[in-house]
C-alpha cells in the first residue's frame, strides 16, 4: 500500500515537474521569439541609423565643400572689393585731375577769348586805318585843285596848322603837306628881293590864283591865271 502511494506521489511529482518544465519551455520559447523579434527590430533600427549616419556624413561633406566654396568666394570677393576700392581711388584722383585741368582750360579759354576780342578790335581798327590810308593814298596819288574859295576856307577852318609853332616858312610847308594828305593842291610859293624871301601857299581856283597865309588862314586874291588848268592834273 505504501509502495503504491509512493509511486502515485512520484508520478504526481513527475507529472507536475513535466508540466512545470513544459510551462517553462513555452515561456522561454516565447521570450526567445520576442528577443529575436526585438533583435530583428534593433537590427533594422541599426541599419536605418547607419544609413542616416551615412547621409549625415555625406551632408556634412557637402556642407564642408559649400563652406570651402563660400570661403573661396568670400576671399575672391574681398580681392574684388579691394580692386574696386583701388579703382575708385584712381578714378577719384583722375576726376580731381580732370577738374583741375578743366579749370585751367576754362581759364585759358577765357584768356584766349579776351585775346581774340582784342585781336578782333585791333583788326577792326587796322581795317579802318587801312581804309583811311587807302583813301589818303588815293587822294595823294591824284590831288586836285579846290573847286571854290569857300571850299578852301572851309578846309582851312578844319585845319589847325595856324595853331602850331614854327617859322612862317615851316608853316607853309606843313600846310602844303596837310592839303596833299586831304587830296588838295596847295603848293608853297617863294619870291624874293635883295633883302628878303617871301613865303606863302598858292591855290589855283577857277582860273585865278589865291595866296594863303598859314599862320592866320587868311585868303587873298593874287592874280588871274595865264591859262586854265583841269581840276585833276593827273586823273585818278
Image: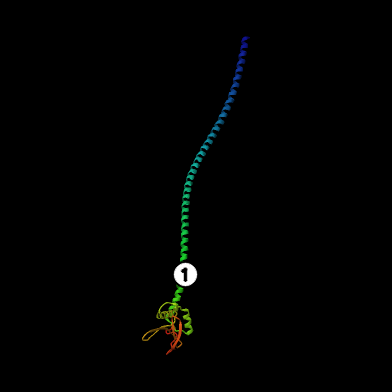
Q: How crowded is mark 1: few (under 14 residues within 10 Å), some or many (20 or more)?
A: few
How is colour applied across the structure in the image? Answer: rainbow
198 in relation to 100, above or below: below
Q: Quadrant of the C terminus?
A: bottom left
Asked if residue 236 shows in the view, the reply is no
Q: Residue furthest top?
A: 1
Q: Is residue 96 or residue 8 the one in the foreground?
A: 96
Q: Is residue 5 left or right of residue 134?
A: right
At 48% from the left and 46% from the top, the residue drawn is 78
Task: Residue 69: give x, y in percent of width and height.
Answer: 49, 43
Q: Quadrant of the N terminus?
A: top right
Q: Is residue 80 or residue 201 the one in the foreground?
A: 201
Q: Is residue 109 or residue 31 the one in the foreground?
A: 109
Task: Residue 221: give x, y in percent of width and height.
Answer: 45, 87
Question: Which quadrant of the structure image shows residue 3?
Answer: top right
Question: Which quadrant of the structure image shows residue 175?
Answer: bottom left
Q: Residue furthest front?
A: 195
At 46% from the left and 57% from the top, the residue drawn is 100
Q: Residue furthest bottom?
A: 226
At 48% from the left and 49% from the top, the residue drawn is 85
At 47% from the left and 59% from the top, the residue drawn is 103
Question: Which quadrant of the structure image shows residue 32?
Answer: top right
Asked if residue 118 shows in the view, the reply is yes
Task: Residue 87: give x, y in percent of width and height.
Answer: 47, 51
Tell me the SS state at disc 1.
helix
Give the total of numbered labels: 1
Task: Residue 106: give x, y in percent of width and height.
Answer: 47, 61
226 in relation to 215, above or below: below
Residue that carries the numbered disc 1 in the rendered image: 121
Q: Is residue 199 or residue 66 the one in the foreground?
A: 199
Amino acid at each position: 500500500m505504501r509502495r503504491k502511494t509512493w509511486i502515485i506521489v512520484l508520478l504526481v511529482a513527475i507529472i507536475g515537474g513535466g508540466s512545470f518544465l513544459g510551462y517553462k519551455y513555452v515561456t522561454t520559447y516565447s521570450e526567445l521569439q520576442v528577443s529575436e523579434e526585438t533583435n530583428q527590430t534593433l537590427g533594422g533600427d541599426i541599419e536605418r541609423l547607419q544609413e542616416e549616419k551615412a547621409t549625415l556624413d555625406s551632408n556634412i561633406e557637402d556642407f564642408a565643400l559649400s563652406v570651402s566654396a563660400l570661403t573661396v568666394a568670400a576671399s575672391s570677393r574681398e580681392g574684388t572689393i579691394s580692386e574696386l576700392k583701388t579703382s575708385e581711388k584712381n578714378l577719384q584722383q583722375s576726376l580731381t585731375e580732370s577738374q583741375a585741368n578743366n579749370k585751367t582750360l576754362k581759364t585759358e579759354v577765357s584768356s584766349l577769348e579776351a585775346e581774340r576780342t582784342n585781336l578782333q578790335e585791333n583788326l577792326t581798327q587796322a581795317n579802318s586805318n587801312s581804309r583811311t590810308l587807302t583813301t589818303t593814298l588815293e587822294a595823294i596819288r591824284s590831288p586836285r585843285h579846290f573847286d571854290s574859295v569857300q571850299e578852301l576856307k572851309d578846309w582851312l577852318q578844319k585845319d589847325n596848322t595856324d595853331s602850331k609853332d614854327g617859322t612862317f616858312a615851316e608853316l607853309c610847308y606843313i600846310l602844303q603837306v596837310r592839303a596833299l594828305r586831304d587830296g588838295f593842291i596847295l603848293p608853297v610859293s617863294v619870291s624874293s628881293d635883295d633883302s628878303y624871301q617871301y613865303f606863302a601857299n598858292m591855290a589855283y581856283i577857277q582860273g585865278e590864283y589865291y595866296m594863303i597865309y598859314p599862320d592866320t588862314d587868311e585868303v587873298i586874291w593874287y592874280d588871274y591865271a595865264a591859262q586854265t588848268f583841269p581840276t585833276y592834273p593827273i586823273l585818278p
